[in-house]
Image (cartoon, helix red, strand yellow):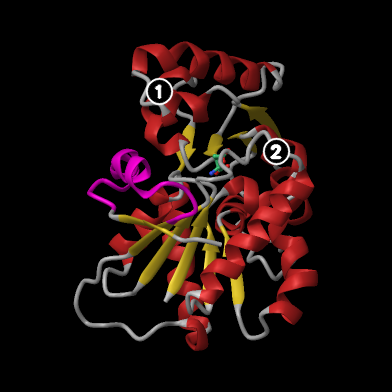
């Protein structure tokens, strides 16, 4: 099985794309609803919670986990891979949602940490909308900068959006915040045109239309779930040892939460597009 981890139900937007790309692969989803949201938490807490999530998913029999949460991936993934994972769970691996996005922006494969001279990356100016923790981790600008130093990156934290989306707020309620965040991001550019934006939080694809309305015309909105799905398939081709056997027929994912299954399941269907029968996974 391939695990998919998120702080709550936002990662279901990523799982949905993964299942659409490979409906016959067995996925297991874990939302850490008992501790969500991660966005306002400090680095140590996010690291500790993410490690606990990996323990749970590996304990369920996953050999590979995709961290669908930008906040967890930005803050904890590199440290976990370098320190904890090789000794705690040798032979297992963890991927995140940042890498496919950085590769798409820079056009430089992750393992090549130097830009090729003959393929200038596009777009030239990229805006990142994300949680406070993702923005303050500096992961997006750092990883883009290493591979494509000519790409200008500006970031904007959007702390109102996750709570709005969690409680099912209407477009009319959310649009003023999205407009304000879009204006604050474009103001940082001092008149330079914006080429593309990253909706760098699992929840934001649900309000992608509001971002598209609020941004200047022609700005590309980069879609994390579909990039992650493509990247996972390429990864599994290169690393068949992590690929679960394809079942040759569609298989439903299993849905686990650290919180109360019933209220989680009721809201989560909106993120996944169809019912999500959650089960509570005790520590
Ligand atoms: N899943 C988180 C992310 O993608 C957002 C929700 C949270 O703050 O926990 O950044």
- Asked if the magenta segment contains residue 269, the reply would be yes
Figure quarter occupied by ligand 1: top right
Residue 226 location, quadrant: bottom left
Is 49 positioned to the left or the right of 145 in the image? left
Q: Secondary structure at mark 2?
A: loop
**Magenta stretch: residue 234 in it?**
no
The quadrant in which the N terminus is found is bottom left
Q: Residue at x 49, y 53 (%)?
A: 258
Q: Answer few, some or many: residues within 10 Å of disc 1's Cα (few below 14, many 20 plus, some between 14 and 19).
A: many
Q: Is residue 222 visible?
A: yes
Label 2 to label 1, Cα distance in Å? 26 Å
Q: Nearer the viewer, residue 126 or 4?
A: 4
Residue 254 to residue 165: above or below: below
Q: Residue 13, how many percent across, how many down?
A: 39, 48
- Picture quarter containing residue 263? top left
Which residue corresponds to the image point at 55% horizontal and 67% vertical from the top-left?
56
At a point 42% along the width and 38% down the height, the residue shown is: 205
Q: Nearer the viewer, residue 180 or 258?
A: 258
Residue under numbered circle 1? 210
Mark yes or no: residue 150 visible. no
Asked if residue 29 lies left or right of residue 88, the reply is left
Residues drawn in magenta: 257-276
Picture quarter containing residue 131? top right
Q: What is the magenta segment's predominant secondary structure? A: helix
Q: Which of pointers 2 and 1 lies earlier in the amino acid sequence?
A: 2
26 left or right of 132 in image:
left
Q: Position of residue 2 (x, y in %)?
A: 45, 72
Q: Is mark 2 within 8 Å of ligand 1?
A: no
Q: Which residue is mark 2?
A: 41
């Amino acid at each position: 099985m391939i695990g998919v981890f998120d702080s709550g139900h936002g990662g279901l937007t990523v799982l949905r794309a993964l299942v659409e790309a490979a409906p016959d692969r067995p996925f297991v989803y874990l939302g850490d609803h008992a501790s969500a949201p991660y966005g306002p938490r400090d680095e140590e807490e996010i690291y500790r919670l993410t490690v606990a999530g990996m323990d749970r998913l590996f304990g369920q029999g996953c050999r590979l986990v995709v961290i669908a949460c930008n906040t967890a991936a930005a803050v904890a993934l590199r440290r976990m891979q370098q320190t904890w994972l090789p000794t705690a769970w040798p032979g297992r691996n963890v991927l995140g949602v940042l890498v496919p996005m950085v590769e798409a922006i820079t056009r430089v494969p992750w393992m090549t940490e130097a830009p090729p001279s003959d393929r200038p990356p596009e777009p030239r100016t990229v805006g990142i909308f994300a949680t406070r923790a993702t923005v303050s981790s500096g992961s997006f600008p750092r990883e883009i900068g290493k591979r494509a130093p000519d790409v200008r990156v500006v970031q904007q934290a959007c702390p109102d959006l996750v709570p709005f989306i969690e409680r099912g707020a209407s477009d009319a309620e959310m649009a003023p915040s999205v407009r304000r965040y879009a204006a604050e991001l474009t103001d940082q550019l001092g008149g330079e045109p914006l080429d593309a934006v990253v909706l760098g939080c699992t929840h934001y694809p649900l309000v992608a239309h509001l971002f598209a309305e609020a941004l200047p015309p022609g700005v590309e909105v980069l879609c994390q779930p579909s990039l992650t799905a493509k990247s996972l398939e390429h990864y599994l081709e290169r690393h068949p040892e992590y690929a679960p056997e394809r079942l040759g027929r569609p298989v439903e994912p299993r849905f686990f939460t650290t919180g109360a299954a019933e209220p989680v399941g009721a809201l989560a269907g909106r993120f996944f597009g169809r019912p999500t029968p959650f089960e509570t996974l005790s520590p």
